[in-house]
Image: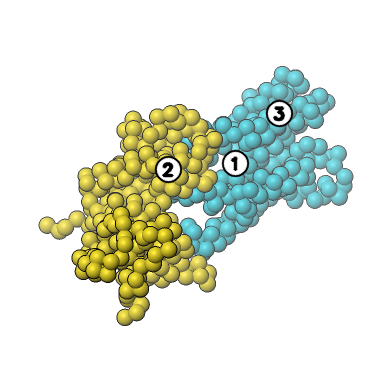
Amino acid sequence: MTRQTLNELTLTLKILLRQPGFWIPTVLFPAMFYAFFGAQSSDRWAASVMASFTVYAVLGVGFYQFGVSVAQDRESPFARWQRSLPGGAVAQWIARVLASLVFVAIAVVLVVGMAFLFDRVEVGAAALLRLLGICLIAAVAATVMGIALGSLTSARAAVPIANLIYLPLAYLGGLWVPPIALPSVINSISQWTPTRAMGELSWAAIDGRALDPWHLGLLAAWTAVAAGIAIVGQVLVRRSGLA
Amino acid sequence: MTAPAPPILAEGLAKRFGSVTAVSHIDLELASGQALGLLGPNGAGKSTTLSMLLGLTRPDAGTARIFGAPAGSQTARQRIGATPQLAGFPDQLTPREVLQYTAARYGKSAPVDALVDQFGLGEIIDRRVAGFSGGQVRRLALALAFAGDPDLVFLDEPTTGLDAEAQEGFVQTAEDYVAQGGALVLTSHHWAEIEAICDAITLIDAGETVLTGRIDAIRARAAVSLLSFDLAPGSLPPAWLAARHDGARWHAETPDSDTTLRRMVREDIAFANLTLAPLGLRDLIDRIRQEEAQS
């Protein structure tokens, strides 16, 4: 890690760690919701429910951290001043991704820890490693979706809009309630959501099944759409003459 | 051997936002060891000009070079410092942390102790910014402009919200910086501050440079003095003096103070507490612009 990246990472972590409004919902809520709604599942489903809530944890960090920070980049006079300093935006972005991985790691460890401690989930190291890989793929998709959100909304609106998208997406994707328990109409919509793709991939990883190319493709397509929105948003900002 | 490139060389800068012309034509040049006051009414185009010089806004026309490098390039950014605006300052950080972060962006260690002394940050250096007064954030913003030991500093309304002592301290810091070879661009509504610090001014109005030059040259161009005096209640000065009353005293501008004073004595005008001073920069500029408009 370069000194510039370390400098940016230190600043980003200090700002985020001192904002309970950020880390309580993103880091603690997934474990708390797991304890409320996911734990005490039957043995057959326990590991899958744990996997669902790890994906839910990953999703929150991407939506909130990147949704808000990208919107702030556009509006905050301090962020604007930072762009007058030497050193590039690359270090700043690498630091953001690393910081998000720190929060993702804590949130995932809390969910898995709760599952192991309170729900007696038994999963081997190989399954956990596969799940970790899916979490990283989901983190990439959630980050790009967060950037797209931040590109379209104001900093003030980013959090409420993130809530409006992220919570229904989690439900629709079957991350809170197993897809089998969703009403049939909802379940048919669910098949097309990025969160369902994330969920299916995580369940396959934890069960040791092969990953379905359809779910990988669906997630890639949603990520590409989000990337397109983010690029259009950035082009519009540049056209406005402010970048 | 070629001469080193000047800190600022900007030619024909122009910028539109949609249908609004923020800057239509600005030329600027600044040498090392000089301070330039960028003046103009609100909405004149000062902030857009600064933004283009900092490389934050891309001009639609014209070029801006900082020490010979394009504004906004890494080479340019390595040599400049600027004050951030007060709004949106991250509340979670302490001044020490922001200073260290800023200096690290320049690849340097922050001279925290020196900056604490220069900008009076001692009591707040390890407190989080949340809850700071406007003056305290302003002092931090000024310190940040100097944290990377830059060769050119842009200061936007640097003393707004500062108490008198802090204002004096800032003027001294700015003078020392320029005396040591630094170049400085200052925007301010405090004309006395501009006169105290700057060698030259550029006046912008409606996005165009309307007056630019060294302050001493501008003074020489309109050598006018200001007579200020009291009159007995109910008395009025003669019309030829064209004096104005500011609620406390009478003031009259004159290009030849000796002749004017002799005539006032000859005509038995009962003035008291008379003072004679050079015309303030603001009045001087107004006079030059009026003369230009009439001619």
- Residue at 80% across / 51% down in the picture? A189
Q: Nearer the viewer, mark 1 or mark 3?
A: 1
Question: Which residue is labeled 2 in the image?
Answer: B162
Disc 3, SS: helix
Question: Which residue is labeled 1 in the image?
Answer: A65
x and y, in percent, of residue B210 in the image: 35, 70
- Mark-to-mark CA distance, 2 and 3: 48 Å
Q: Is residue A107 above or below residue B19?
A: above
- Chain that bears disc 1: A
Question: Which residue is labeled 3 in the image?
Answer: A31
Task: Specify few, some or many for label 1: CA neighbours under 10 Å numbering under 14, 14-19, or 20 or more.
Answer: many
x and y, in percent, of residue B97 in the image: 44, 33
Q: Nearer the viewer, residue A84 or B170?
A: B170
- Mark-to-mark CA distance, 1 and 3: 18 Å
Residue B177: tell me if it is visible: no
**Left or right of residue B157: residue B28:** left
x and y, in percent, of residue B32 in the image: 23, 53
Shade of chain A as shown in the rendered figure:
cyan
- Chain that bears disc 2: B
**Left or right of residue B141: residue A157:** right
Dot 2 and dot 3 residues touching (CB under 8 Å): no
